[in-house]
Image (cartoon, grey):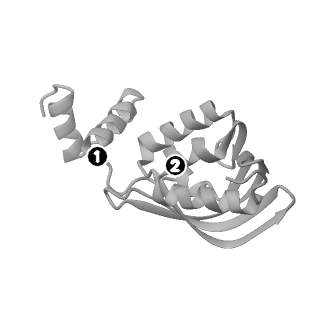
Amino acid sequence: MSANPDPKQVVLDMFACMDSEGTRVAFPRYLHPDVIKYDTGMGSNVGLDMVMTGLEAYLEVFDRPNVHADIKNIAASGNVVFAERVETNFNPETGDKFVGELASVMVVEGDKIIRWSDYYDSSEYRYGRAMPRVPSIRKLMKMFGELHKTGITMRTRLWDYAEARYFGKSQ
């Protein structure tokens, strides 16, 4: 990158990287080590290490490592960039995807984003509509097992099979 990169271009480059190379590559490349990443649905993560830990937790459940951003509006004032977009979080291997609208305000310092605030309707996540459409059986059994430990039982053929197969209980 140049000595004084255009803040808007830094943000656009990050979005392009998230699409082509994935978030695991884009975040360390474009986020400042002391980044503050605020998320409407989850609060703030401070520091790149914490952001990466949060990313890995997200990917463990949702398994959508790439993001395509369809930019609707983007504007900059100094080093502050506003980006309104429709994001498609997707897994190129499984084809699973989730589409949502959001807006962000990002503060760019040099060639890194030091503050990133996302604003969106988090109900898609709270109420399960954003859950993966093609979860692996292993992840599904793990989720069922965690629910079962809390006293929630799911009496379905799939659950009966899971109990017999993974928990050693007869049907």
**Which residue is label 2 attached to?**
23
**Residue at 78% over, 68% down:** 75
**What number is the disc on residue 51?**
none
State left or right for residue 40 relative to residue 163. right
Establish if 8 lies above or below 49. Answer: below
The extreme bottom residue here reads 72
The extreme front residue here reads 3
State left or right for residue 32 relative to residue 15. right
**Residue at 36% over, 57% down:** 133
Q: Position of residue 46 (x, y in %)?
A: 70, 34
Near mark 1 (Cα within 10 A), the count class, few <14, some 14-19 or many ≥20, is few
**What number is the disc on residue 136?**
1
Q: Position of residue 64 (x, y in %)?
A: 43, 52
Q: Are marks 2 and 1 in contact (CB under 8 Å)?
A: no
Specify the quadrant that holds the C terminus.
top left
Separation of residues labelled 2 and 1 (CA atoms) = 21 Å
**Residue at 76% over, 58% down:** 7
The mark that comes first in sequence, 2 or 1, is: 2
* Residue 153 in sight in this render: no
Q: Position of residue 169 (x, y in %)?
A: 16, 27
Q: What amino acid type is highlighted by mark number 2?
A: Thr
Judged from the image, the secondary structure of the residue bearing numbered disc 2 is helix
Near mark 2 (Cα within 10 A), the count class, few <14, some 14-19 or many ≥20, is many
Q: Position of residue 81 (x, y in %)?
A: 78, 60
Q: What amino acid type is highlighted by mark number 1?
A: Ser
* Residue 13 in sight in this render: yes
State left or right for residue 162 relative to residue 78. left
Judged from the image, the secondary structure of the residue bearing numbered disc 1 is loop
